[in-house]
Image (cartoon, helix red, strand yellow):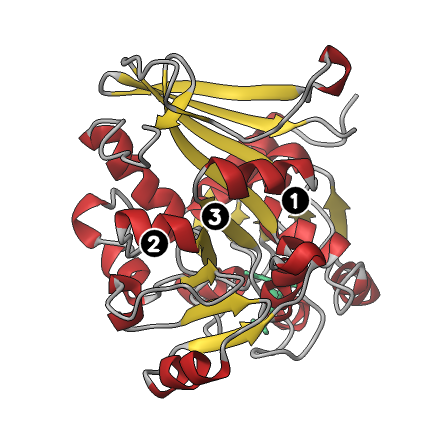
Amino acid sequence: MSEFSRNDHEYMARALRLARKGLYTTMPNPTVGCVLVRDEKIIGEGFTSPAGGPHAEINALTAAGNASGATAYVSLEPCAHYGRTPPCANALVEAGVTRVVAAMRDPNPRVNGGGFHILENAGIQTASGLMEAEAREVNAGFFKLMETGLPLVRCKMAMSVDGRTAMDSGESQWITGPDARADVQQWRARSCAIITGVDSIIHDDSSLTVRSGELRIENPEAAVEKQPIRVVLDSTLRIPYNARILNLPGTTIIASAHPDLEKQKELESRGIEVLTVPGSDGRVDLSQMLKVLADRGCKEVLLETGARLAGSAVRQGCVDELLIYMAPILLGSQARPLFELPFEKMAEKLYLDIQETRSFGQDLRIRASLKER
Ligand code: AOF
Ligand code: ZN
């Protein structure tokens, strides 16, 4: 028998729904939901505010006013540390909560069981592990960052039914329809950084921005305000001076292996960060770039690029999730493939786990993870 009741499940499911509301605004923090219940009634609830603001528990306690004798359902262990805000575990103790049910432990080394410890020392009943799989999924990027020091990398591609992503000339606009393209906006909005290759910039002059008109989320303005960091991998600084991405508010990083110093200076004088990220055979090493982004707190990164960089990212094992939009078109055998992966034998094939398929207008979205090799 599970130690959790049916009501426990319902309240935790609600805490998880609240947590999802923060997916676009809490980075680099995880997004957490909290529901306070007394005598089978919800007396307050909340989710994590943008970084620096109150955590979920504090928002719920504020909403409740008086939470004495209540049970707190939280989708993550309450924090135990003084970070940008004081510990939530202390606030729950002070509020007189008598039971805390968490979906899972917070793997952040500054918490990692410390929150439960504070609560238990104060005589509060604690339980953990309710709907843990769902809670893991909501903050998958945060957990990967905490556990491996690298962000979760999602690779977005648009392809035809015959698996082609661009014509031989590089022409690729548009493969998918407006609904699928609008869906991409949600994934951009929840990413801390978007990475592309210089060839995509040269070809499509992409801006990689989040635009409010296409966001179907709670607070589109906040997400637009918080533009993801734009990263262009450009080993030899080929980016044209008139590229749109060089003239946008927010942070643009050009990662180069051998920058031409004069061009670097010129770009820097325009407010662009030029980083030297060495790699093998003179090309920027993607995993090094991911480490740089991890150090800046990036937990989810979106790779939006062509077959070559995407193929090499997959081959290096840098990609956690594929987000593939399939349009009802055929582009023919001269068009470019989804990934440049020059395999010759069946033994080289990579395996995917398809997690979900969904329609957007006439297009199909396939979400899949790469199986461990
Ligand atoms: C909670 N409730 O809603 C969240 C938590 O810098 P700070 O003070 O904002 O702390 C950030 C850390 O707190 C973050 O890395 C994670 O371990 C935890 N997040 N904890 O009790 C919340 N978002
Ligand atoms: Zn907290």
Q: Amino acid at mark 3?
A: Leu
Give the numbered dot on residue 142. Answer: none
Tell me the quarter of the picture where residue 329 sits: top left
SS for callout 3:
strand
Tell me the quarter of the picture where residue 358 sits: top left
Report, in whole angstroms, how far the alpha carbon at label 3 lies from the one at label 1: 12 Å
Between marks 3 and 2 in the image, the one whose residue lies nearer the viewer: 2
Residues at circles 3 and 2 in contact by the CB criterion of under 8 Å: no
SS for callout 2:
helix
Q: Amino acid at mark 2?
A: Ile
Q: In this picture, is 182 found above or below 98? A: above
Q: Amino acid at mark 1?
A: Cys
Residue at the image position 63 percent from the left and 78 percent from the top: 83
Judge by depth and name the residue closer to the eye, 105 or 203.
203
Report, in whole angstroms, how far the alpha carbon at label 2 lies from the one at label 1: 21 Å
| Label tally | 3
**Quadrant holding the C terminus:** top right
SS for callout 1:
loop
* Residue labelled with disc 3: 302
Q: Position of residue 304 (x, y in %)?
A: 42, 44
* Residue labelled with disc 1: 318
Residue at the image position 40 percent from the left and 12 percent from the top: 162
Residues at circles 2 and 1 in contact by the CB criterion of under 8 Å: no
Q: Position of residue 266 (x, y in %)?
A: 37, 84
* Residue labelled with disc 2: 201
Q: Position of residue 43 (x, y in %)?
A: 44, 52
